[in-house]
Image: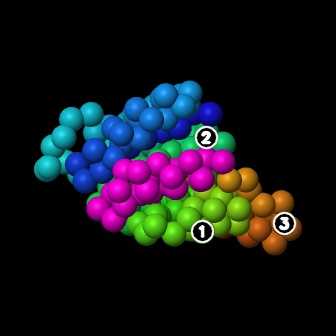
Amino acid sequence: MKIHLATDHAGYSHKNAVADWLTQEGYTLVDHGATVYDPADDFPDFIARAAMAISRNPEQRAIIFGGSGQGEAMLANRFPAVRATVLYSNNPEIVQLSREHNDANVLSIGARFLSIDETKQHIWQWLHADRSDAQRHNRRIQKVAAITKNIHT
């Protein structure tokens, strides 16, 4: 599975730790930055690259990082076919439901609220959670896709 990573300064340490770990686990990674720590950088410069990659290949996944993960997810969700969810609490049900009910293909991590170890646990669960086959979940995902298909034209 190919996983895209992106962050600004607030999630820089988390991204690097996760990248090392996922590489050891055998995943193929694409790092969209930041590649150096710069406290003056801006998340859109990096998150947009990862979101564009997922928009072009929605079956792939991205993990993006920021202070809260909120702005990062808001930007990512502007791209067609991106379904980003935010995680900034240590509640495993969030990532499980994001995959089961909404087929989330982007996980936005609030690095200021989770330790690196907690982050890895949630990412592992998210990567291994299956999408639900329930008709109601599929219907909702299809409706979102249909509604958003023409928004960006």
- Residue 26 is covered by the magenta coloring: no
Kindly identify which numbered label has been placed on residue 93: 1
- Residue 122 is covered by the magenta coloring: yes
Q: Earlier in the sequence, mark 1 or mark 3?
A: 1
Q: Position of residue 122 (x, y in %)?
A: 52, 55
Kindly identify which numbered label has been placed on residue 60: 2
Q: Earlier in the sequence, mark 3 or mark 2?
A: 2
What kind of residue is marked 2? Gln
Instruction: Report if the CB atoms under discs 1 and 3 are less than 8 Å apart.
Output: no
- Which region is colored magenta? 107-128
Please state which of residues 1 and 129 is positioned toward the viewer in this rendering: 129
Mark 2 or 1: in front is 1
Q: What residue is pinned by disc 3?
A: 134
Query: Taking 119 as reference, is 147 left or right?
Result: right
Residue lying farthest to the front in this orientation: 117
State the CA–CA distance, disc 2 to disc 1. Answer: 22 Å
State the CA–CA distance, disc 1 to disc 3. Answer: 18 Å
Q: Residue at 61%, 57% (x, y): give it.
A: 104
Secondary structure state at the residue bearing disc 1? helix
Q: Is residue 96 visible?
A: yes
Mark 1 or 3: in front is 1
Q: Which quarter of the image is occupied by the N terminus?
A: top right
